[in-house]
Image: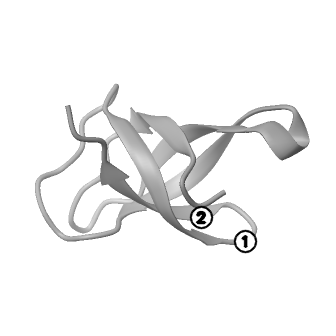
Amino acid sequence: MVGSTGRVTGKIGAGLVGEVLVHVPERGGTEAFLAYLAVPGEPLPTGSQVMVVEYQPPRTVYVAPLSV
């Protein structure tokens, strides 16, 4: 899970729990996870590409924006 990339489907920011869709090859599809910023900073709007930095089962991830 850590190192996987995904797309923000619900804005992520300080004090906000967002949502991301992440491709999970081990389970054969794309799944939604609750998402938090891994490092405080600018909010991530819907459509942003992110990388999973930390995974907390069952459905929570901490993400960082992908460099463009």
Name the image colouring. one colour
Residue reaching furthest to the top: 47
Position of residue 23 relative to residue 12, above or below, is above
The amino acid beneath tag 2 is: Thr
As helix, strand or loop, the secondary structure at mark 1 comes to loop
Depth check: 16 or 21 in front? 21
Q: How many marks?
A: 2
The picture places residue 19, in percent across and down from the top left corner, at 48, 45
Position of residue 60 relative to residue 12, above or below, is below
As helix, strand or loop, the secondary structure at mark 2 comes to strand
Q: Dot 2: within a 10 Å radius of its alpha carbon, few (fewer than 14), some, or many (20 or more) residues?
A: some
The residue at 87%/32% (across/down) is 28
Depth check: 10 or 30 in front? 30
The residue at 12%/62% (across/down) is 41
CB atoms of marks 2 and 1 within 8 Å: yes
* Residue at mark 2: 60
The amino acid beneath tag 1 is: Pro
The picture places residue 33, in percent across and down from the top left corner, at 60, 50
The picture places residue 66, in percent across and down from the top left corner, at 30, 42
The picture places residue 53, in percent across and down from the top left corner, at 46, 64
